[in-house]
Image: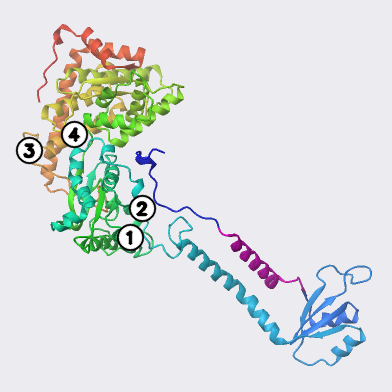
Amino acid sequence: MDKDNPADRKPDIKQPQALPWWNYLIWFVLALMFASLWLGPEQRTLSYNQFKERIRSDEVVSVTFQGDEVSGQLKPAGPAGGDEAGPRTFKTTLPPIDDPELITLLQQHDVEMHAESEQANLWTTLMIGMLPWLLLIGLLWYASSKMSKGLAGGAGGMFDFAKSKAKKFRVEDSQVTFDHVAGLENAKADLREITSYLKNTERYKKLGAKIPRGILLMGAPGTGKTLLARAVAGEANVPFFSISGSEFIEMFVGVGASRVRDMFESAKKEAPSIIFIDEIDSVGRARGAGLGGGHDEREQTLNQILGEMDGFDPHVAVVVIAATNRPDVLDSALLRPGRFDRKVTLDLPDKKARIEMLRIHSREVPLADDADLERLAALTVGFSGADLENMVNESALLAGRENKEQVDMAALLGARDKIVLGGKREMVVTDEEKRWIAYHESGHALLAGLLPNADPPDKVTIIPRGHALGATEQIPEEERHNLSQRYLHDRIGVMLGGRISEKLVFGEFSNGAEQDLLQATRLARHMVARWGMSEKLGPIAFHQGEEHVFLGREMAQQQDFSEHTAQVIDEEIGALVKGIEQEMMVLLNDHRPQLEALAEALLQKETLGPGEIQALLAEHRSNSAGETVQMGV
């Protein structure tokens, strides 16, 4: 096991132990007692008349009187005994009227008579009636005591469901440090002060410094929030309690608050320590926003978290780290100073960070000589750390399926395409459909290569993958954080290129442009209504309303503008998209030879790379369009 590998760390959880041999012996004896007392020998019940008839027939061997109950033994079945199969013991009840003939009848037929005290019968009956209850109570007590002692892996006893489910990681196993976290330099700088405090608590106490109560890690899924929290614990070399926000909530009211109290008590006993609450938005959403607006279990849990963080001694070295990808829905009381004092934002990694992450995730993977991690990092814009780790693993699986000894660049690119585009689909595409798809994708690729502000095309394919029949990939030459109006204009133009190409070549449209139209319309709406890129509306943002934290986006749409303004917004969006469509129609028509060349090459090869695309565009460039057209907005 590699102790430096965060995946090899194991939580401090006890393993179930075997029961000692004498426990099995006790249960075996109890089972025998229960069988002997509860079941007993099988008996037949006779009426009093039948009982006397058996005596007269000389079938009764012996009887035992116990109060008004009579039990006895019949002669065994067979030639010399009774002629009736079945149990040979019986019981009957004496009538409340004295029968002086019974004793005489028994004596005349030589029946052996016995008598027992009625008190013994009552005691036996009482024991038989109470034994099942005693066994059930004993079983419940035994199971509860064993589970509470950790026999079931430390999860708590049957009546300990209110105990915290936080997993404690041992100090010696917390080997993840900031060196294992690629990128996120600003986030690591913000957290180094916390680790310094936890390492040198006494020095900070002498100076009167107070440790921040809580740290909120905010970022998209897969950006490394959990890994960064573990790195803080590893750097500080302190116990680490990890729990998900959803683990607080149960069907029983008050369980979540009880678990919060228990978790904070455990962390205080181990101070200095760290509590990590993942997905805190599951319990930390804004209060009073439910359908009933009541004080439900989730709100009780949140109130308890707030109370515990307020109740910290200023010098108790317990740090609460929480992670969420939805900071917009958190309750404002969680975010005020004194609760989560610091908010650390984790962004998607840039190219330099992606290269470092790829090197870390490929340490255990035998890479071939042609594996270019720098080029791969350039092709993975928008990938998170988790995406990169998954891509490396997928490439290793792909190389294994192809019986390769090493993971080469082809396997890495294949894994990337599988993540971005989806797996290949086994479907039959007719020649006519393939021709439609080829011209559709050629329209996207040609406009991406012609428009000056668009991202250049990197790959075009007509192989069905995922939910698409074909795909055109664009890779930006540099990472963009601020989108200009010209870039957005050309981006919409590329989206409309497939639809326009179909119209030019076939004279009609197909449904293949559905996703293109959705993305183009959404982008145009943002340009007009949010980013002030409409001359008619001016520099005004028109929000459609904010998402309700419980009801969701669709049920909480609220317009803060008039119906007339809404109509103007729709008109401006339509005018923007239609204007771009007309410009792209002219541009594609002027470069029809290049469109035909791209489509024919796709029909032959099915997939074109960046070099092949550029070569085709340069070879078939018409004289009238010898230079790239500069599109206006």
User: Disc 3 vs disc 2: which is toward the camera?
Assistant: 2
Q: How far from the left and from the top, in percent, is residue 631? A: 11, 21
Q: Which residue is mark 1?
A: 266
Q: How much space separates mark 3 and mark 1, taking CA atoms? A: 58 Å
Instruction: State the extent of the magenta-drawn residues as a range.
Output: 19-43
Task: Please tell me whether residue 25 belongs to the stretch shown in magenta.
Answer: yes
Q: Nearer the viewer, mark 4 or mark 1?
A: 1
Residue picked out by circle 4: 523
C-beta proximity under 8 Å, tags 1 and 2: yes
Label 4 environment density (alpha carbons within 10 Å; few <14, some 14–19, many ≥20):
some
Give the spatial CA distance, label 1 vs label 2. Answer: 10 Å
Q: Are marks 3 and 1 in contact (CB under 8 Å)?
A: no
Relative to 445, does residue 130 appear above or below in the rendering?
below
Towards the viewer: 128 or 563:
128
Residue type indicated by callout 1: Ser
Q: Which mark is first along the chain, 2 or 1?
A: 2
Mark 2 crowdedness (10 Å alpha carbons): few <14, some 14-19, many ≥20: some
Mark count: 4
Residue 41 image-quadrant placement: bottom right
* Cα–Cα span, label 4 and label 1: 50 Å
Q: Quadrant of the N terminus?
A: top left
User: Residue 213: x percent and y percent?
Assistant: 20, 56
Circle 2: residue type: Lys
Observer-side mark, 3 or 4, equals 4
**In the picture, which quadrant includes the C terminus?**
top left
Q: Secondary structure at mark 3?
A: loop
Q: Are marks 4 and 1 in contact (CB under 8 Å)?
A: no
> Would residue 345 appear left or right of 73 to someone viewing this image?
left
Name the residue beneath numbered marker 3: 537
